[in-house]
Amino acid sequence: MARPHGMLLSSDIVGGPGGGTGGAPPLVEAPPPHDVRRAADLLRLLVSLTALALTVLVAVATSDFARRVQQGLLSAATALPPDLRDTLLGTVQAVAMAAPLAALVVLLVRRRFDAVSRVLPAAALGAAVGWTLTRLALAESRPGLWPEVLVGRGGLVHAGWPSAVYLAALASAVVAAGPWLARRWRAALWALTVGCAVLGVLAASLVPLDALGALVVGGVAGSAVLLVAGGPSDRPPAQAVADALVACGIPLAALRELPADRQLPGEGLLYGAETTEGARLTVRALAAEDRNRDLFHRLARRVLLRHPADPGEQTPLGAAEHELLMLVFAARTGARVADPVIAYPVAGGGAVVVTVGTDARPLSALPAEQLTDTVLGQMWAAVARIQEHRLAHRALRPEHILVDPDGGPRLTVFARAQLNATPETLGADLAELLATTAVRVGPARATACALAGLGPERLTSALPYLQPLALIGPARREVARYDQARARQATAGTRRRTLRPGGRPNLMHDLAAEVRTACGAPAATPAPLARFTWKSVLGLAGAFLVLHLVLPQLANAPAALHALRDADWWWLLAVVPVTFVSQGFSTCLQLGTIPGRLPFRATYQVQFASSFLNRITPGNVGGMALNLRYLQKTGIETGAATASVGLQSLAGAVSNVLVATVFFAAAGQRHGGVRLELPVGKYALPAVALVLAAGGLLGLTPPGRRFLREKVWPFLRAAGTTLTGIAADPAKLALGIVGMLGLPLVQIVGLALSLHALGGDLPFAQLGAAYMAARVLANAAPVPGGLGALEAGLIAGLTALGVAAGPATSAVLVYRLLTFWLNVPLGAVALGFVQRRGYV
């Protein structure tokens, strides 16, 4: 039965509109409000960071174009009458001085010291980031004549004020003060800030790209401070919830916020209510915060899944009404669910979902002795009923299942439920509940209880969806923690052990094996859930590589082919093993930087696959990611695996320095008159300012200290333990040293063989010096494998040392063909192989 602005289900509890207690006001008990980290601030931070990256990209990658465009805009601005420009400039300066001062005074008069404690650090951080941005990233894109257009112009103060740095601080302060301001005040302050930027551009006191960058920096700095320090919640207060319940006709006697251990993160705020007749209710208050959190969930699913099947954006009232309707439908299927009462709006844009209250506790809060097979079997029977009617819960986890005192489970929190659900959605429901219950009772018992409640046919239908991608959100994190705990338990008490590639504990794999055994079902092919696969991602990266990097290299192909005609083929054949030997040294380096023993063959195959990814990603990012995944799949903790990969990169850099120093000294280049000058002063101050700001946010705020304590320190401890264990093992040290020194040396040998095959000749020491100098230049180039940069550096180095241009060019091209491009097909085959074997 319809109600004004809401939905009504139970006339036994709800009276007429406006009916309430009719006497004393209801008792409202809730803890004092506290600061929270809001999803809206995270969303604003991500959007602002994206806009900042685009701004920097335009300024750096297209500096000439940006300079011409901004010069045209400034020319148009300077065409305005001088008096008009001075008037605009004076207006901007007056507003820029008065607005922040007035806002600060208002906050102090209203004793909003918590807001002031966010505004001031945000302004300081915005100024620091704005100064860094304008000095480093945007300087090259400014028109050369810009400062001269300010000569002779007047205002209240200097014509170049307010600067972009001041504008960034102002925008940061506005963002940080936003949660304490009413909507109209936020809009007014943003209008003034944007107006200052626009008028500053019109008055030619600001460069357009600087003004845009300052506004974007404001979003970044202000949102970062709010995320670290927290801000007021945008959920409706308890009194507003009580007023809404009275307004919809519930004779409310008392409303109490449930304790923290009864709350559901990201699922609204739970209250317990009592009516004047003694009935008990459970009230879940929804607000814009829940809608923002759900937005992140939907975005993650749309990015990762091929068919996410998510509803569109809903208002809190729309979400409340949807959940109430799903509860009614679920009850009609015969499943035990929370008894629905009403959905109704709350003043300020929120809404409430009211259900009949009981003494039930979440399944996730039950002690182990109360998680009986009967309880779990009844839970699965309820799931079977809603699955028969193609109703997907889409958040089917133990915390969303209530267990009554009599042991009967009830399904609740149908906020994301979907009618006429697809097989993918229904299968993901089963996989999510099966995995999260297995975390508590183990894979074998969880499977047996699911078989008793679902039957073999329906349980077998879940096999294609027992994969990590079917779990997005809390369930996936819970399963990951469970697997990590099992991996730590397996390594406890052992100083050194033999690791098995792909041998990390895998709950989803264990569940699939249990289901196949229990149901007598054959192995099922995993459902194609991923929107992006290795093949699609590598295909896009390969297309980018061909278009932007490989095609220019093909211009040299005729010269390389011509050189091969006169080459000594026996010496060229001697270059081919260099590719295989270099991967062997890479394997030695990895084996020497991990705290356990890995088989050489599997690690060698992974190194070939990593070399293929390094051909299409800059800075060896792809190879490092694959190595990290490989170590994690063997059961090594994330911190230890990351430390190992980082140690490999550090060892490679150290070996390059050592080998280069030896060859430079041997080639007589120690005092060649070459001097490297770095503009340390230009970068030191911004770097120090940013480090101090980040350290202050992390060390001086409770959320920051909690992040350091719970995330950073455990990671550093794991990394330190790894390094200590490696340093105490002479065999590991010897293996690592062989790998780090052998890598550059075998490449120099390959270059020497190629040069000799093409008729060139050069002492090995000078050849090594030329290679290492070119390697340093190529490492600084943001292209995969130093493509183009290494070739140019080698040719220049060889010709400078006396090799003829023809043989030098031909030798370098042939060398890269046999050591760089040969890795592409071999590495692609290796990548497919290690994926099929489950190594990565």
Image (tube, helix red, strand yellow):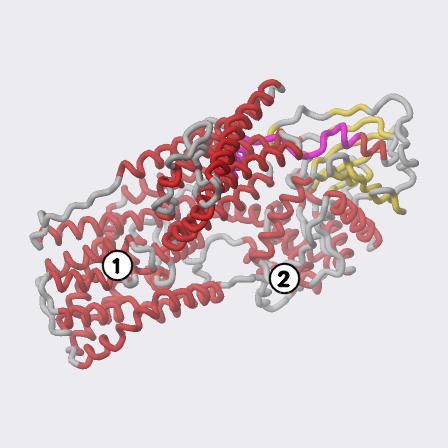
Q: Is residue 291 left or right of residue 658?
A: right
> Which portion, as a residue range, is magenta?
218-242
Instruction: Using the image, tell me which numbered label, if any, was put on residue 715.
Output: none
Residue 632 image offset from top left, x and y in percent: 43, 52
Q: Is residue 255 above or below residue 615?
A: above
Task: Work out which quarter of the rendered image holds the C terminus and state it.
Answer: bottom left
Q: Tell me the residue at 70%/65% (across/down).
A: 457
Residue 585 numbered mark, or none: 1
Asked if 367 appears above or below 765 in the picture, the reply is: above
Three-letter amino acid code at the position of disc 1: Phe
Local SS, label 1: helix
Asked whether residue 232 is drawn in magenta, I would say: yes
Q: Residues within 10 Å of mark 2 (few under 14, many from 20)?
A: some
Can you identify the residue that label 2 sits on? Answer: 307
Neighbourhood count class around disc 1 (C-alpha, 10 Å): few under 14, some 14–19, many 20 upward: many
Residue 562 percent coordinates (x, y): 21, 79
Seen in the image, is 513 located left or right of residue 417? left
Of the pair 276 and 600, the residue shown nearer to us: 276
Decide: marks 2, 1 in contact (CB < 8 A)? no
Main secondary structure type of the part rendered in magenta: helix
